[in-house]
Image (tube, rainbow, N blue to C red):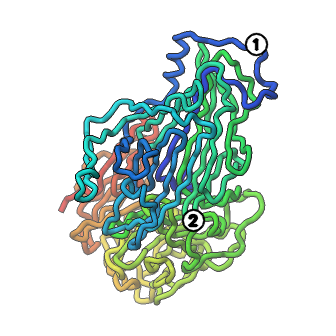
Amino acid sequence: MGACRQREGGIRLRAVVPVVAVLCVLLAGAQTASASNDALRSTVTTNTDANLTEKVKQTLKKNAETIRFIENKGQLADPDIRYYYETKQGAVFISRDRIRIVAHEFEAQGPSTAPENEKAALVQPTAEARLKATHAFTVKIEGANPEAQIRLGQAFATRYNYFLGEDSARQVTGVQAAKDVVIEEVYPGIDLRLYSTDKGDLEFDWILDAGVDFSQVKMQFHGQDRLAIDKEGALQVGLRFTDVAFHLPESYQVTEQGKTLLNLAFHQADDQTITFKTASEIDRRYPLVIDPTLSWGSFLDANATLFDQYLFAIQLDPAEGLLYCAGATNLNIPTNAAPYDADGYLNTISGFYTGNVTNQGLPRAAVIYRLTNDGTDIVDLTLYGPSSLTNSEQTVAYGLSLSPNRVFIAGRTNIDIPTTGSPFDSTRDGNDGFVAVFSRDLGTLHYATYLGSSGDDFFQGATSIRALSDTSYVVGMTVGDALPAGPAAPDYITTGADLTFGGGGAGSTSDMYIAKFSSLNTLDWGTYVGGFGSDVFNDLEVFPDGRVAFAGYGSSSVTEVNSAAASGSSDDGILGVLNSSGTAFNYLDRIGGSGVDRIYDGTGCKFQVPQNSRRLIRVKARSLNPR
């Protein structure tokens, strides 16, 4: 399930992709997909230049040796399986004329439904996750040589021994692990090489001798639920609990001058058979490389062209083996696009824009979901916002934190949203921050409150939150005006290191605000950070002893404490540490040069100097330990 791309400070989710395999087809002097392809040159010559052969080798991706292809000497019951490898996400079984791919689905408990002849290769259950089910499909090389030889490439030094019961006859010893394998003469004049990338992905190279017709290469798919070529040209293979997609990012010929790009595509000959086609002019004197990719996962967008989702916060719970994510979406997420049980707190919202995206993907609602840590299954999902949206209304979650039994989110909204559990502040004024607390299964909203001033808290609202327990947390945000204070509720400013907005100067545009709450709605302390000017909060972390490290940037002059770096003349990064009671700064520093300098991350703070040197300095807020 992610190809992701950065956008507007977040990540636009297309899919989470835990396992990727790459299918490269090397066609040395290949013909076109059919005799009727008039793009083929009429003159046929063969280029046997050794230098050109070397150029072809140089275009192939280097074997990163990240996959161990285990030879089958009898530890697997199926003798046709010659080599295999496995990961937690799945397993791949290699025979002379086919490749069987098995996807895994995990759950906390439950029996495995994997076939007996493949169980020896599967990842064993752990205390956190148990193999629930598998779904396998096979890519059969149609018309392949049944007597093709599989040659072991370079081997790792390690040998493996398998002791399968007490019968010594079933003991398999000295099993090798190959760095790559080659199926020789899978078709006349065609070899198939399998190896790995530096990311642990599988690659296939189909290597064809000069003059061999690439239309001989026919891949028959068996066992999947669906097989289709989508409007983007990708081959979609649908399984029960995940999707697999083959993409064609590049194809080219290799000449004496280097690469000549071509345009090749998948062709679906029937319900099961996939070949290649092209309208490009192909010169039979030169090799041809086709480079599809195979991705495991499922898309959240159901191929909706208007889909515009952002991921801003993510946290792994190692005990559950689940990833919790928060962000925003401009469309309802259909269960057939990203299978999940539609039993969240709020699964549909009316009023999402259905025309052309002309208003930056608005309106938007917050989205929170949790998925398996291999990205193959969305366990639960909920939207958060009003039941109906119009125009430019939006609710966005920027921060997320887990307590033992709750999911805390923080963000910004410009529309009335559901509040519950005796909110600390039940009134929204324009753009406000918010905090919401859900059950772990995202089905119950336990607490929600606005946070903000009477001004426009337009800098993303609350961008970071850290849960201390099921009922206590620390939150940070940017406020555009002085917060309510005094005997009338809500009282944001009672105890804190800095109780004055903007340093007391008229015309200040924004300040950081950091607060600790207990019993969900009881303010323990709250403090501004900033001076006269514009100061923006980004992130925070809580030390075990209760001190709070924070990060942001601003243009105002702050009163530094234990300063360790020089400040500049424009926007500077701001780092600080509050004591556990929020009443004093253990450390406060403005850091920068003559350009615009900003710190975004309080765990591994990214301190960027975009002007002149364009350096990127990483500052670990956890190492800021003054007392």
At x 43%, y 74%, the residue is 408
Q: Is residue 370 above or below residue 293?
A: below
Q: Is residue 236 above or below residue 152?
A: below
Rendering coords of residue 604 (x, y %): 34, 52
Residue type for callout 1: Thr
* Pointer 1 residue: 43
Rendering coords of residue 603 (x, y %): 33, 57
Rendering coords of residue 524 (x, y %): 32, 81
Q: Earlier in the sequence, mark 1 or mark 2?
A: 1
At x 23%, y 52%, the residue is 168
**Where's the N terminus, which quadrant?**
bottom right
At x 32%, y 33%, the residue is 155
Tag of residue 328 = 2
Q: Nearer the viewer, residue 283 or 624?
A: 283
Residue type for callout 2: Ala
Rendering coords of residue 542 (x, y %): 29, 67
Q: Is residue 10 visible?
A: no
Q: Is residue 616 above or below residue 87?
A: above
Disc 2 is placed on an element classified as: strand
